Image (tube, grey):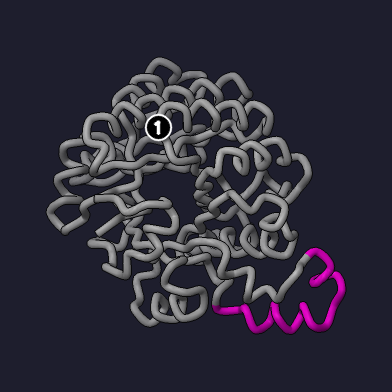
Amino acid sequence: MHDFHTHFIPVDVLNWIKENQKTVNARWANKEENKEPFLVINDKWGFELKNSFIDFEVFITQQEKVGVTHSMISPIPQLFLYDFPLEITTEISRVYNKALADLKKEIPEKISALGTVPLINPVKAAEILNEAISIGLKGAIIGPGLGHQMLSDPFFQPFFEEANRLKAILFIHPLLSDDPRLKNRMMPNLIGVPWETTVCATDLLLSGIIDKYPNIKILFAHGGGFLPYQMGRLDKGYQQWNLVSSNLQASPSEYLKRFWYDTVLWNQESIDLLVKTVGEDRVVAGSDYPFDLCVWPPKEISEKGAHTLLDYVVK
């Protein structure tokens, strides 16, 4: 069984954060009893530094214990550092990518990895993506845009052109929503995270970007957010309005089948609907391990999606 949605922080990355603690405004906070310290970046993103995040032996042992034979590891979104100057974001990208590439070399049969890039500068992001793939990574994990700048914006063209040339996997993973209406009851996480995915996925689908860059393999976190559930509405809009159909060569429901989606949905009926909507060759097992809201163990599904996403059978 594969797990395409996992996160890990190598020791070199932790050391970099400690060395640049003041620059990135990092602090370690003891928030709750019987929990590890929380790493807080720039007073914005905080997460518990569990052993499974930072001890590779613990990470891989837990994966093996539940029957995962191959994990695709991604950097954690809280360390994208898009809010910082380009040189900082570039530096941590290179450190993170090399550290993950080194882990992959230790057990290549069990590990694939994605890198991180300084998305704030698409030309530099393209360069870092190229470097990442040259050292053995499969592509990159990126956020759903920058503030109000959607990924379909021409601003990101240099990055998408290079990703297309490299036939890279782009795993689109949101951070917490900063919608002011979602301040309470954990809503920035509960519905804000899949909402950000929904907005990004809908924008990319309707932009026709997948026709322009057909070699990029776009994987959406958390089952594509709310998008698969609302395809009837998009198809109706496609029939009704030129503003919806002008960039497309087929209905939105057909384009939906050209992306990939993980199974981080916590509900078998939701997974069944997703598979029925997009096809089993477009759905891959994922867990979001080791975050608190992970699906653990990941749901075992057909390996067809794993094979199409990776282009070969991982043995």
Magenta segment's dominant SS is: helix
Which quarter of the rendered picture does the N terminus lie within? bottom left
Q: Judge whether residue 314 can be spotted in this image.
A: yes
- In the image, residue 21 sits, relative to residue 1, either above or below, namely above
Q: Three-letter amino acid code at disc 1?
A: Gly
Residue sitting at 75 percent across and 59 percent down?
Answer: 207
Name the residue furthest right.
242
Q: Quadrant of residue 192?
A: bottom right
Which SS class for mark 1?
A: loop
* Residue 240 part of the magenta segment: yes
Q: Would you say 207 lies left or right of 57 here?
A: right
Is 273 in front, or is 226?
273
Residue sitting at 50 percent across and 40 percent down?
Answer: 140
Which segment is the magenta one? 229-247
Q: Which residue is mark 1?
A: 136
Total residue callouts: 1
Q: What is the x, y in percent for residue 13?
A: 37, 26
Is 154 in front, or is 189?
154
